[in-house]
Image: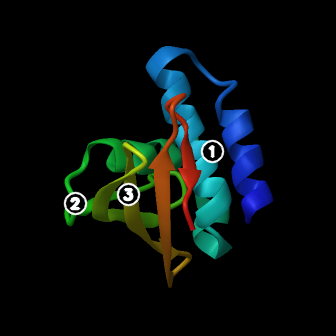
Amino acid sequence: MIIGGALGGALGSQVGGGQGRTVATIVGTLLGASVGGAVGRSMDEQDRLKVAHSLETVRTGVSSQWRNPDTGNEYAVVPTRTYESSGMPCREFTVNGNVGGKREQVYGTACRQQDGSWRMAR
């Protein structure tokens, strides 16, 4: 999982520029490291962008939900706790997925780094 997160973050940081690059880095790092199983494998680029957007903008405890029109898969992201560590924001979150009629829930924690990327905290 750590290798997946590092690789995802490295690949994500090469996409876009400015805020787009930060979002791509967030997406790659978070999903590469924490969203496993059917949920992680089923997400396309738009799903990953929606996860990143949720973690960047949605208040703690509020669910962000969507259905992928191409795959029919459904996802919900809920930031469950926001706190600071070493002066940087961190977020605990859950990702609930309904992939092919099977439900799966994944938990993770990520902290923003000085360069704007997010790194899994545990």
Label drawn at residue 60: 2
Look at label 2 and name its amino acid. Answer: Thr
* Sequence-earlier tag: 1 or 3: 1
- Report the Cα–Cα distance between label 1 and label 3: 16 Å
Label drawn at residue 28: 1
- Report the Cα–Cα distance between label 2 and label 1: 21 Å
Left or right: 115, with 51 as reference point: right
Nearest to the observer: residue 100 or residue 95: 95
- Report the Cα–Cα distance between label 3 and label 2: 9 Å
Circle 1: element type:
helix
Label drawn at residue 91: 3
- Above or below, 41 relative to 52: below
Q: Can residue 65 be seen?
A: yes
Q: Give the residue drawn at x 38%, y 57%.
A: 91
Q: Residues within 10 Å of mark 1 (few under 14, many from 20)?
A: many
Which of the image's four quarters has the N terminus? bottom right
